[in-house]
Image (cartoon, rainbow, N blue to C red):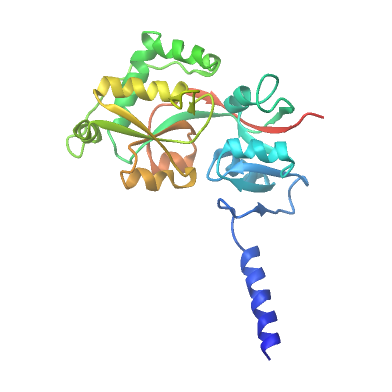
Amino acid sequence: MRRGLALLLTATLALSMTACGGSKGAGTQKSEKGDGMTYAVEAGSAGEAVAKEKGFNYNSVSSQADALMEVKSGTSDAAIIDLLMAGAMIGEGTSYPDLVHTTELTSEKYGVGCRKGSDLASYINSVLADSYADGSSQEIAKKYGVQDSLLEQEPCEFKQSDSDSDVDYIKSQGKMIVGITEFEPMDYKDKDDKWIGFDADMARLVGEKLGVDVEFVVIDWDNKVMELDSKKIDVVWNGMTLTDEVTKSMECTNAYCNNAQVVVEREK
């Protein structure tokens, strides 16, 4: 009797584990429609969305950097990551000299995410517009090699909320908390452990205009909306693709950069 119960419990546990969805740490998600390869993707990312849409077998990991490590180690056949990250992190002279990007799966645009209804998005739009007009954003883009992806910004005037102003809230706190993941060339650490990158530098520019400090906090990308709504962070500024899901759940800025989701594989 005990042996029968033990076998039943084992079978039930196995079935429940198999039924788990494609969230971070859930392992490989299998599909009969895929191409037979297993792709490493960042949980909650545009890359994961593409993998789901195309019916690929995929393995959700914590970051796009981890996705590259999966390919390097042979745990996954390929990764789906942002084109801008691929340009900075793979190929000759990088930590992944034997990796190449092949197929371009999507074309998309980056934006900055704030709490739904937040006037901070309008403020950031005004800074993006002014910095494009005076050439400072182009100079920052050249510094990190993303100048060809930068989008022209139309003149934009800040419209402050009559009540519950996030801009006033941030000023009262004396700092703007920016949610990020490590994502070269947008947000990454230099040899002195300082956050740098195009997005990091632009966030500091906004902080400077607001007269507040800027604090960078590494977040679980899958929980970015929750982090915003709970006010653990004030903004998501990390090469974020403006998907329908993102724009419905956040107050987003105008698009500021072109991007694509690409397949990265070991060079054959």
Quadrant of res 164: top left
Residue 8 x, y percent position in the rendering: 67, 80
Q: Is residue 91 above or below residue 246?
A: above
Q: Is residue 132 left or right of residue 148?
A: left
Quarter the C terminus occupies: top right
Quadrant of res 175: top left
Residue 221 x, y percent position in the rendering: 48, 42
Give the residue at x 33% y 41%.
116
Residue 218 x, y percent position in the rendering: 44, 38
**13 and 159: which is toward the camera:** 13
Quarter the N terminus occupies: bottom right
Give the residue at x 47% y 44%.
220
Give the residue at x 38% y 29%.
253
Q: Is residue 218 left or right of residue 96?
A: left
Count of numbered circles in the view: 0
Residue 23 x, y percent position in the rendering: 56, 52
Q: Residue furthest front?
A: 192
**Residue 80 seen in this snapshot:** yes
Q: Is residue 204 left or right of residue 166?
A: right
